[in-house]
Image: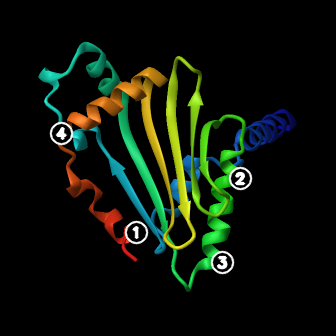
């Protein structure tokens, strides 16, 4: 009987101890995607609307490394500036975690953008774009894929130029851009 209680207590401690309670972007997306001041979108690769037969092998490889994009945007207005600041600071705190390696930063602290990634130089699992503007709000874009690398991203940019982007998938973001 004592052994059973000891084993149950040990299992409970191990289970509770293994739960990771530190914030991540994925958790942040899940927690906020249904809230009224947020707009959440999942964008598939077919948004690019590209004829794959006209792409080079390198362009096809880059396109195949891209799985999907998750977008979470906070629409700021005069009534929610305190919430905007709090939410923006939460995202900034998450992105300070060493697993999010910053590639570049543009703009000042109040308005600007940053690009980070998760993974190694040869196997990037996620690119993160965080852009914010006090008047409009902020957006966090997670570009998810397998075996992405900086070359694939640059190649994907050339594919974007050839694409006929399906704007219907981005329609919910229109309200964020309107003033």
**Which label belongs to residue 82?**
3
Are circles 2 and 4 on residues that touch, CB within 8 Å?
no
Q: Which residue occupies the extreme front position in the image? A: 107
Q: Are marks 2 and 3 in contact (CB under 8 Å)?
A: no
Which residue corresponds to mark 2? 93
Seen at 32% across and 47% down, the residue is: 43
Q: Residues within 10 Å of mark 2 (few under 14, many from 20)?
A: few
Q: Earlier in the sequence, mark 2 or mark 3?
A: 3
* Residue 21 horizontal side relative to residue 79, left or right: right
Judge whether residue 148 can be spotted in this image: no
Residue 118 at what x, y percent from top left? 58, 32
Which mark sits nearer the N-terminus, 3 or 1? 3
Which mark, by number, is residue 176?
1
Which residue is found at the position 41% from the left and 29% from the top? 153
Element on which disc 2 rests: helix
Instruction: Tell me: residue 23, above or below residue 84.
Output: above
Give how far apart the Cα atoms at labels 2 and 1 are: 23 Å
Q: Earlier in the sequence, mark 2 or mark 4?
A: 4
Q: Nearer the viewer, residue 84 or 40?
A: 84
Image coordinates for residue 10, horizontal then vertical, percent = 81, 36
What's the mark number on residue 49? 4
Q: Residues within 10 Å of mark 1 (few under 14, many from 20)?
A: some
Q: Which residue reaches farthest right?
A: 2
Question: In the shown orientation, is residue 36 left or right of residue 58?
Answer: right
Alpha-carbon distance for marks 3 and 1? 18 Å
The residues bearing labels 2 and 3 have C-alpha atoms spaced at a distance of 17 Å
Tell me: residue 26, above or below residue 103: below
Image point (25%, 36%), residue name:
161
């Amino acid at each position: 009987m004592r052994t059973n209680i000891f084993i149950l207590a040990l299992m409970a401690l191990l289970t509770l101890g293994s739960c990771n309670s530190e914030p991540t972007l994925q958790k942040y997306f899940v927690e906020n995607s249904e809230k009224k001041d947020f707009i959440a979108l999942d964008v598939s690769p077919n948004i690019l609307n590209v004829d794959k037969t006209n792409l080079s092998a390198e362009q096809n490889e880059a396109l195949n490394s891209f799985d999907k994009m998750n977008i979470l945007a906070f629409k700021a207005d005069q009534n929610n500036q305190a919430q905007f600041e709090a939410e923006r600071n939460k995202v900034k705190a998450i992105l300070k975690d060493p697993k999010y390696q910053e590639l570049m930063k543009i703009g000042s602290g109040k308005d600007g953008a940053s690009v980070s990634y998760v993974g190694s130089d040869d196997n990037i699992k996620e690119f993160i774009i965080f852009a914010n503007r006090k008047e409009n709000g902020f957006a966090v874009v997670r570009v998810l894929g397998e075996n992405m690398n900086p070359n694939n991203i640059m190649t994907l940019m050339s594919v974007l130029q050839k694409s006929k982007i399906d704007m219907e998938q981005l329609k919910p973001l229109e309200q964020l851009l309107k003033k």
